[in-house]
Every structure is written in C-alpha cells, then in structure tokens.
Amino acid sequence: MNISRILRDLEDVDASGPAAQAAARLGFLEWAFSSAEATPQAACRALEDPATQKAQSAAAQAFVSYLHEATLTIAPRRRKSRLH
C-alpha cells in the first residue's frame, strides 16, 4: 500500500490520543509489511511524498512521526573483547 493511500485513510480517522496512535501504528505496519524494502532509506523516500507534508489529522500526523522515527539508524553494538 502506498503512502498517499495510507495517509488518505488516516485522514478519515476521527480520533485523538491513544486511538490516533493505534491507527497510525497500524498504518505504519501496513506500509512496512507491504513495502519491498522497509529500511531507513525507504522511510526517507516515503517522507518525500507530498502527502506527508499535508498530514492534518492526529492519526496522519502520528503516522508521519513514525516514518521520521524509522529514518533513524541504530549503531551496531560493539563486541566486548574477552579478558582471558
């Protein structure tokens, strides 16, 4: 499912607070699992979609926030050397 359609559906959600967060989370999971590549780079490309700039409902704004969080990369853990 593409970003524009997910956002369009989320704009129709008349909820706020936890209900909006839950709808946004479901939208994000729909995007991640239907995407061929759910990576930080894919999230960056998704944020370039003009629809993300126009998000108005609480659910749509929360979805965009999830996309922003998905752009963050986590540094790999450093291996601890053995002390033997």
Image: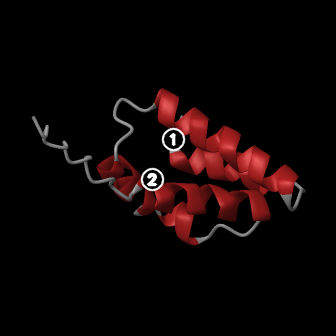
Q: Nearer the viewer, mark 1 or mark 2?
A: 2
In this view of the protein, which residue sits in the foreground, 29 or 54?
29
The crowd level at tag 2 (other Cα within 10 Å; few <14, some 14-19, many 20+) is some
Quadrant in the rendering for residue 26: top right
Q: Which mark is residue 70?
A: 2
Give whichever of discs 1 and 2 has the lower sequence position: 1
Quadrant that contains the N terminus: top right
Kind of residue at disc 2: Ala
Where is 25 relative to 17, above or below?
Answer: above
Q: CA distance from mark 1 to mark 2?
A: 16 Å
The residue at 34%/43% (across/down) is 39
Task: Say whether residue 12 is visible.
Answer: no
Give the SS element for disc 2: helix
The residue at 40%/52% (across/down) is 43
In this view of the protein, which residue sits in the foreground, 46 or 8?
46
Quadrant that contains the C terminus: top left
User: For mark 1, what is the residue?
Assistant: 2
Q: Which mark is residue 57?
A: none
Q: Position of residue 13 (x, y in %)?
A: 84, 51
Give the SS element for disc 1: loop
Kind of residue at disc 1: Asn
Where is 31 relative to 57, above or below?
Answer: above
Residue lying at the far front in this picture: please name it: 84
The crowd level at tag 1 (other Cα within 10 Å; few <14, some 14-19, many 20+) is few
In this view of the protein, which residue sits in the foreground, 29 or 73?
73
